Amino acid sequence: MASTARESAGSRRRRPPRHGALRGLLLLCLWLPSGRAALPPAAPLSELHAQLSGVGQLLEEFRRQLQQERPQEELELELRSGGGPQEDCPGPGGGGYSAMPDAIIRTKDSLAAGASFLRAPAAVRGWRQCVAACCSEPRCSVAVVELPRRPSPPAAVLGCYLFNCTARGRNVCKFALHRGYSSYSLSRDPDGAALATARASPRLEKDAPPLSKAGQDVVLHLPTDGVVLDGRESTDDHAIVQYEWALLQGDPSVDMKVPQSGTLKLSHLQEGTYTFQLTVMDTAGQRSSDNVSVTVLRAAYSTGDGCSICICSKREAKEFSETS
């Protein structure tokens, strides 16, 4: 009995720890939901699929970009070689052209390689009109058409840009795929193109330098202190595009104005001798210079003919200057 009583008492003494463990387990169960809320929740399976799908889309975009590089190279080769369906090219150059839709010239790279922009024809109503403008331009080898954005009126004006893609005897233009644009590469008949270029480009012929004529020397008698020099008798086998006057000798306070191209108006001239130089430039950039002198004499000096402005030869002007 005593032993049994002791065991019963001992079992009663061991119960508090078991109740304490249960109490701790209950507290742990109450704490776990709040603990899971504090930590980042596990991503649902649908979210993982969405993330993987996003990565797949990114890789697909990279794949499309890599695939686009190859057609772009093929596009450049096709445009440079005049590939694609050929149609007759109207205009003096003859030959034909090939169309490449969704293609635009890479302007910066092409110009850096030696290509040149020619012009942008206005009021172009259709791509055929743009191609015809390029065909009629002897140096044009590529026409780029910018299509109007939709919706657009039926007779909308198109952007038309003409380029010369030939440099150092080869085609140097580069192209890229771009919706809303179309490029047309011209392949001209060699004989027709040479004939058209010769007709439209006189610079390829012999171009002689210009001949500058500043005019005859002038003698003034005070109080007349002004005169207009005229260098418009200067000549060139093509055209003179620039007249430039400069004072080489004399009082720099003289007033010099250009009323019209080729002339020089002088005022407030003082007694003495002035030398002016006229330099002309032609369409090829060639220059020529000629000098003219203006001699201003005292009012007391008279030639006897009563004139206040005398146009004379250089020898006569020198004699006036020495005797005054």
Image: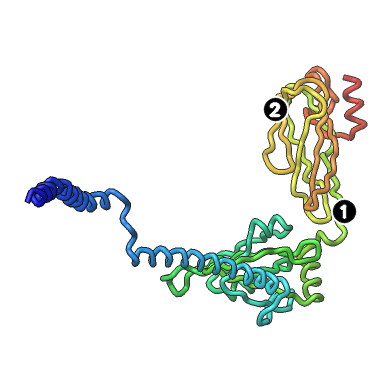
Residue type at mark 2 is Asp
Looking at the rendered structure, the kind of residue marked 1 is Ala
Residue that lies at the very extreme toward the top in this rendered image: 300
Question: On the rendered structure, is 154 left or right of 272?
Answer: left
Residue 230 coordinates in the image, percent (x, y) = 77, 40
Residue at image coords 72%, 22%:
253
Left or right, residue 322 beside residue 131: right
User: Mark on residue 208?
Assistant: 1
Q: Crowding at label 1, few (<14), some or many (≥20) Cα neighbours within 10 Å?
A: few
Placement of the C terminus among the 4 image quadrants: top right
Which of 138 and 303 lies nearest the eye of the viewer? 138
Residue 284 picture location, percent across and down: 80, 52
Residue drawn at x 65%, y 72% as measured from the top left: 75
Q: Quadrant of residue 256?
A: top right
Nearer the N terminus, badge 1 or badge 2? 1
Judge depth for marks 1 and 2 and give the one in front: 1
